[in-house]
Image (tube, helix red, strand yellow):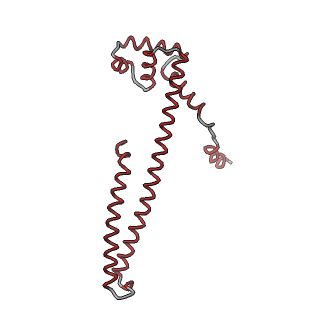
Amino acid sequence: MTRDIKNAPLALMILIIGQILCAGFFLFDVAEDGLDLAWPPFHDIHFVIETFAALALIAAVGVEVRFLQQLLRRKAHLESQVSIAAGAFQDIMEERFRDWGLTPSEADVAMFSLKGMNIAEIAALRGTAEGTVKAQLGAIYRKAGVTGRGALLGLFVEDLMQSAKPFDPAPYTAKSHATSG
């Protein structure tokens, strides 16, 4: 699915190029037909339909180009926001790990745990026994003052939410107030 989304702009560009070529062909054909007909050529229904089709195709290409530009701008904006959030999360994570006094091994295990990996996966990635990972997780939870993985993740989510702009519930409640009265 992700690869399909990444290929969408390329597919749209190829489609647009094909439509531009077709529009050029139709315009050439319309111009050629117009020269062959007596002036004004609009009395010939075939010419009128061909002209309308060529103009509609050109308009569609214009709309698609605009849509593609908007898509690419939105994609760049979202990638920028994800990068900022990832950087902020990384900064918060490093600061917390330092504050808690985690060892490098514990920080590694904590990071893998926050990524959603289970004990067996962490042990395999680190080349250690599962018991070692369990002991390190216990030390991490104790140093962080939490009881498990969910609470550990909750600390980071809370930190991220505190660093974000304040939440404004008005856009979500305006509709419910309007319908409840």
- Location of the N terminus by quadrant is top left
Does residue 47 lie above or below 10 as drawn?
below
At x 52% / y 13%, what residue is drawn? 142
In the rendered structure, the answer to whether residue 179 lies left or right of residue 37 reads right
At x 48% / y 41%, what residue is drawn? 80
Displayed quadrant of residue 31: bottom left
Q: Nearer the viewer, residue 8 or 116?
A: 8
Does residue 162 lie above or below 2 as drawn?
above
Image label count: 0
- Outermost residue on the right side: it is 181
At x 40% / y 71%, what residue is drawn? 55
Does residue 120 lie above or below 19 as drawn?
above
Query: At which x and y percent is residue 62?
Result: 43, 63
Query: At which x and y percent is residue 123?
Result: 36, 17
Q: Nearer the viewer, residue 39 or 173?
A: 39
At x 37% / y 55%, what residue is drawn? 12
Q: Nearer the viewer, residue 93 or 141?
A: 93
Query: At which x and y percent is residue 169?
Result: 63, 40
Does residue 51 lie above or below 21 as drawn?
below
Query: At which x and y percent is residue 64?
Result: 42, 59
- Outermost residue on the bottom side: it is 38
